[in-house]
Amino acid sequence: MDDAKGAGVRIPPPVVFIFFMFCGLGLGFSYPIAIHFPVALAYTGVALSIFGLMVLLHLATLFKRVKTNIEPWKPTSRIISTGIYAYSRNPIYLAFCTIPLGGGLFFSHIWLMLSVIPACISVYYLAIRPEEAYLTEKFGDEYLAYRSRVRRWL
C-alpha cells in the first residue's frame, strides 16, 4: 500500500466548515431571519464554541503525543481508540460543528447554525469516506473491529 498521501483527502475539513460558515453568514445578509435567543442561550453558545475549541486543542495534543498525523492527507501510524475516540470515530469533526452552532446561538444567527448541515454532509464525502477506506485498507481487522464498536458521530 502506498501510504505517502494518507487517506488522500484533498480539501482540509476545517476549510469545508469555514466555507459553509461564510455561506451561512452570506445567507443571513441576503435573507435575514429576525430571531433573538435569550441571553442565557446566547452564553450557552459561547460555552459550546469554547468547549469545541478546547476539544480540538486536546485532540491535537493527543495526536502529537501518540506520534501520528492529525491531517487526513498524511499517513496514519496508528488507530486511536481511547478517550473521546472510544465514543466517536470523528470527534474532531464534531468539535468543528460546535463553532458555528455556538456562534449561531450567540449571535442569534439561524443560517450560521444551519451551515453545519451541508458542512457535515460535505465532510462525510470529502474526508470521512476516504479516511474510512484508507484505514480499512491499512489496518484491516483492527479498524473494522473499532468501527463496529464505535459510532461515526455520537
Image: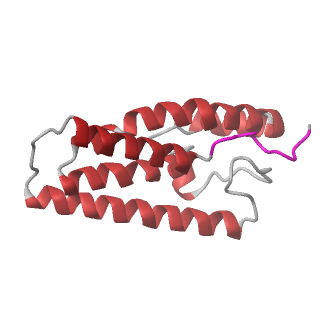
Q: Say whether residue 86 is visible.
A: no
Residue pushed farthest right? 1
Name the residue rendered at 44%, 41% in the picture: 154
- Counting labels gives 0
Instruction: Left or right? Give the position of 37 relative to 137.
Output: left
Instruction: Left or right? Give the position of 126 relative to 108.
Output: right
**Which of these two is toward me, 104 or 83?**
104
**Which of these two is toward me, 13 or 27?**
27
Q: Position of residue 35 (x, y in %)?
A: 10, 44
107 shown above or below 16:
below
Write the start and end of the magenta stretch as one range: 2-11
Residue 88 falls inside the magenta stretch:
no
Give residue 126's quadrant in the image.
top right
Name the residue rendered at 20%, 34% in the picture: 31
Q: Position of residue 49 (x, y in %)?
A: 34, 60
49 shown above or below 127:
below
Residue 7 falls inside the magenta stretch:
yes
Name the residue rendered at 29%, 55% in the picture: 103
Which quarter of the image is occupied by the N terminus?
A: top right
Task: Name the magenta segment's main secondary structure.
Answer: loop
Q: Position of residue 52 (x, y in %)?
A: 41, 59
Q: Position of residue 124 (x, y in %)?
A: 55, 32
**Which of these two is toward me, 126 or 133?**
126
**Which of these two is toward me, 11 or 79?**
11
Give residue 26's quadrant in the image.
top left
